Amino acid sequence: MKILLAISIFFLSCSNDTQTWKEYYNSGLKKHKNGDYYGAIADYTKSIELNSNFVYAYWFRGVAKEIMNDRMGACGDYKISAEMGHKGAEAIIWDDHCK
C-alpha cells in the first residue's frame, strides 16, 4: 500500500502544467489590467511558448514591456507583431518610437 501511495505521489508531482496558451494569455490580460506588468509579461511569454502564432500575446507583452521602460524589448515584440500583420504595431515601428 505504501508503494502504491509513493508511486501516486510521484506521478502527481510530475504532471505537466495543464494551462493552455489561451488561459495564460487571459491571465496576462488580467494581471496587465491590475498593474502587475511583470506577472503579465511572464504569462504572455508562457502563452507564446505554447502558441507562437498568436499575435496579440506579442503585442500586449510589448505594451507591458514598454510600461516597464524596456523599450528595446517592447520594440522587439512590436516588430514580431507587425510581421504577423498587426497594423498598430506596424505604425509604431515605423515612427521614431522604435528607431
Image (cartoon, rainbow, N blue to C red):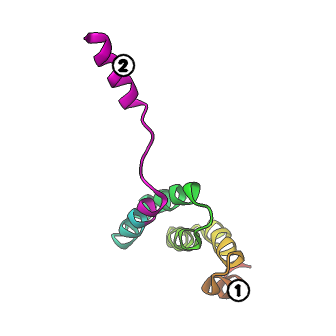
Residue 19: image location, x then y, percent: 42, 52
Q: Secondary structure at mark 2?
A: helix
In this picture, is 95 found above or below 10? below
Question: Is the magenta region chiefly helix, strand or loop?
Answer: helix
Residue 5: image location, x then y, percent: 28, 18
Residue 45: image location, x then y, percent: 54, 58
User: Foreground residue, 68 or 42?
Assistant: 42
Which dot marks residue 96? 1
Q: Secondary structure at mark 1?
A: helix
Residue 41 in the figure: left or right of residue 88: left
Hey, what amino acid is under mark 2? Answer: Ile
Which dot marks residue 7? 2
Residue 52 in the figure: left or right of residue 3: right
* Region of the chain picked out in magenta, as a range: 1-25
Based on the picture, tell me whether residue 17 belongs to the magenta stretch: yes
Hey, what amino acid is under mark 1? Answer: Asp
The image quadrant where one finds the N terminus is top left
